Image (spheres, rainbow, N blue to C red):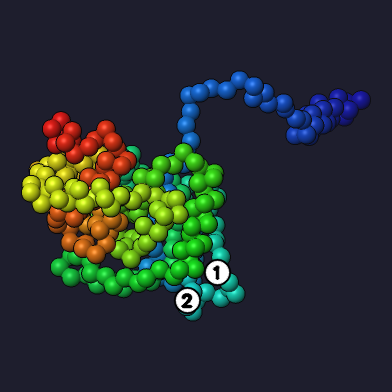
């Protein structure tokens, strides 16, 4: 009798504990709050600067900062001796709903730390760089056409999942971290992506009109800095051609003026910038921008 009195409460706890694990709950979703937004707002494109095998090793075998990096997707290229699969395919290393560590210290449109709100896509593309006088001088390679076709299909898929992402938020790693990153570099086919419905690009006729206008009178450096900042770049409008401006202009040129990446503002660079502003920020046309800002 005494033994039963001691064991009974214990057995009761064990039984109820087990049964509670099998219980179910009905979730009512008939009431929805409008106070929310989608987490994914950006797609950031990278190159790996190394081959497929090294890329996978970096993304899977380094678990301690600062080497602990990752991306949601990796897309290989042909003629890579380290790639041993029969056909090219897209690899997903991190689920879309999870945070991949690909952007690092970054900023776009005033939002810092883009890992929290972005999808990162890495394209295997081998780049050779040398550091001279604290500057990186790199030899860039063309991207594999079959690889770009896989990228386009990946973007098609992602934009069906996240149609809220605007064209100006499909961006380069160098756009969001211009002081430390070059990828995906000046050989990346941004215009081709735009022709397939992804990312931003300027209208050539509008660009020509601005070029003709700027042949007579170039906008001030301060106006150009303010326009770059409005477009999305992390830049303080100082009115001086300082290091941060050189880095941002170089990043802008790698994206939109790939035949002339100098970090210096010329007529073509300014014309493309304001053609983009007119297209994607119509409230900030050049005349209004120069007068108000």
Residue drawn at 78 percent across, 34 percent down: 22
- Position of the C terminus by quadrant: top left
The residue under label 1 is 88
Quarter-wise, where is residue 186 in the image? bottom left
Q: Nearer the viewer, mark 1 or mark 2?
A: 1
Residue 119, percent from left and from top: 46, 49
Residue 211, percent from left and from top: 17, 51
Residue drawn at 52 percent across, 51 percent down: 156
Evaluate if marks 1 and 2 touch, with contact meaning CB atoms under 8 Å apart.
no
- Position of the N terminus by quadrant: top right
Q: Secondary structure at mark 2?
A: loop
Q: Is residue 64 visible?
A: no
Vertical placement of 177 versus 130: above or below? above
Count residues near mark 2 (Cα–Cα under 10 Å), then give few for <14, some for 14-19, many for 20+: some
Q: Nearer the viewer, residue 115 or 269?
A: 269
Quarter-wise, where is residue 133 in the image? bottom left
Count residues near mark 1 (Cα–Cα under 10 Å), then give few for <14, some for 14-19, many for 20+: some
Residue 200, percent from left and from top: 36, 49
**Residue at far right of view:** 1
Residue drawn at 75 percent across, 30 percent down: 24
Vertical placement of 164 versus 208: above or below? above
The residue under label 2 is 80
Q: Secondary structure at mark 1?
A: loop
- Dot 1 or dot 2: first in sequence order is 2
Q: Is residue 139 left or right of residue 21?
A: left
Q: Is residue 171 visible?
A: yes
């Amino acid at each position: 009798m005494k033994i039963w009195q001691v064991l009974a409460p214990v057995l009761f706890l064990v039984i109820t504990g087990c049964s509670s694990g099998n219980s179910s709950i009905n979730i009512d979703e008939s009431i929805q709050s409008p106070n929310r937004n989608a987490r994914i707002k950006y797609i950031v494109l990278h190159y790996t600067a190394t081959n497929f095998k090294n890329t996978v090793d970096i993304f899977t075998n380094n678990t301690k900062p600062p080497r602990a990096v990752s991306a949601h997707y990796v897309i290989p290229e042909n003629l890579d001796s380290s790639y041993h699969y029969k056909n090219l395919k897209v690899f997903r290393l991190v689920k879309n709903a999870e945070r991949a560590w690909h952007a690092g210290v970054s900023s776009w449109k005033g939002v810092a730390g883009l890992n929290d709100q972005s999808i990162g896509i890495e394209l295997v593309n081998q780049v050779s760089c040398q550091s001279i006088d604290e500057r990186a001088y790199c030899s860039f390679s063309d991207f594999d056409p079959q690889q770009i076709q896989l990228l386009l299909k990946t973007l098609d898929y992602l934009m069906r999942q996240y149609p809220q992402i605007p064209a100006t938020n499909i961006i380069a790693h160098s756009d969001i971290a211009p002081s430390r990153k070059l990828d995906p570099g000046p050989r990346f086919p941004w215009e081709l992506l735009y022709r397939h419905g992804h990312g931003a690009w300027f209208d050539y006729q509008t660009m020509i009109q601005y070029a003709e206008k700027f042949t007579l009178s170039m906008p001030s450096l301060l106006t150009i800095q303010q326009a770059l900042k409005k477009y999305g770049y992390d830049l303080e409008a100082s009115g001086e051609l300082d290091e941060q401006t050189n880095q941002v202009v170089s990043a802008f040129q790698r994206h939109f003026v790939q035949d002339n990446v100098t970090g210096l503002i010329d007529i073509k660079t300014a014309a493309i910038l304001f053609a983009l502003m007119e297209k994607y920020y119509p409230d900030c046309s050049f005349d209004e921008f120069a007068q108000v800002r």
